[in-house]
Image: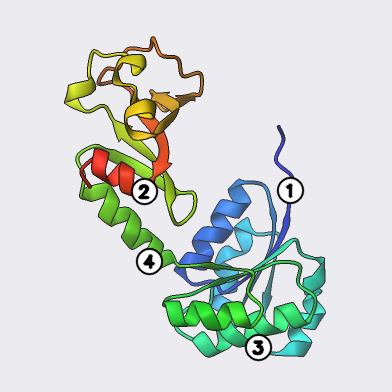
Amino acid sequence: MKRKKKSILLIGLGRFGRYIAEKLNELGHEVMAVDINEERVNDVMHFVTNGQIGDSTNEFFLKELGVENYDICIVTISGDFQSSLETTFLLKELGAKKVVSRAERDGQAKFLLRNGADEIVYPEKQLASWLAIRYSADHILDYIEVDDDCSIFEVTIPKAWIGKTIGEIDIRKKHELNIVAIKKDGKLDVKVTPDIVLNEDISLLILGDNKTLQKVFKI
């Protein structure tokens, strides 16, 4: 299925904002990049649709951007929470459809949510959580939080499972965990059947409760 192209207003072009701009460009979306720093705007112009130098806490400047016309507005201002908060508030006041704002602490997240943010991202907190889980266990290759209580873990095959079939380990019955896909040579296969034999050259994507996953894989 072809991905729908979205128009995105990205405000704040520090390292995190720049990485987002690069990825959005790779995905084929239209990006308007904004920062008060001219050099930062110039640095991203070769991979964004357009760029503007300006103060996002200035209501007139934001109004001129036509924020209500973008599918998503992302605020990634770092090191200046007051500007981030004011920008978030103004975006919503001016009719932004969806505002996603960056927070560095829980307290900031609460203020942003009360002042117009629809969703919050925690780059440092989320990366710290990923690193802690990824490198504190022998079998974890990657993981994605589905919600506060549930995640998908990509795991290598524990020694005790090698040579057995998915049906024999039966983690759905024993632990209420679900194998949603098998990964081999970088390719995913969602056709998971009980007769598949587990070996060292594959990994499993397993969906389940966080506490159960941590217990089974000794995190």
- Assign a secondary structure to mark 4: helix
CA separation in Å, label 4 and label 1:
29 Å
Q: Which residue is mark 1?
A: 5
What kind of element bears circle 3? loop
Camera-side residue: 190 or 178? 178
Judge whether residue 8 can be spotted in this image: yes
Question: Spatial distance from mark 3 to mark 4, Cα to Cα?
Answer: 26 Å
Of marks 3 and 4, which one's residue comes earlier in the chain? Answer: 3
- Look at the image and tell me in which quarter the N terminus lies: top right
Above or below, comparing residue 163 to residue 150 in the picture:
above
Query: Who is closer to the viewer here, 83 or 158?
Result: 158
Kindly identify which residue carries mark 4: 125
**Mark 2 vs 3: CB contact within 8 A:** no
Identity of the amino acid at label 1? Lys
- Above or below for 22 versus 10: above
Secondary element type, mark 1: loop
N-term mark: 4 or 1: 1
Helix, strand or loop for disc 2 = helix
Q: Earlier in the sequence, mark 3 or mark 1?
A: 1
Height in image: 138 above or below 84? above
Upstream in the sequence, badge 1 or badge 2? 1
Q: CA distance from mark 1 to mark 2?
A: 33 Å
CA gap between label 3 and label 1 equals: 28 Å
What residue do we see at 65% from left, 88% from top? 57
Q: Residue at x 62, y 46 (%)?
A: 27
Disc 3 designates what residue? 57
- Disc 2, disc 4: CB below 8 Å? no
What's the amino acid at mark 4?
A: Lys
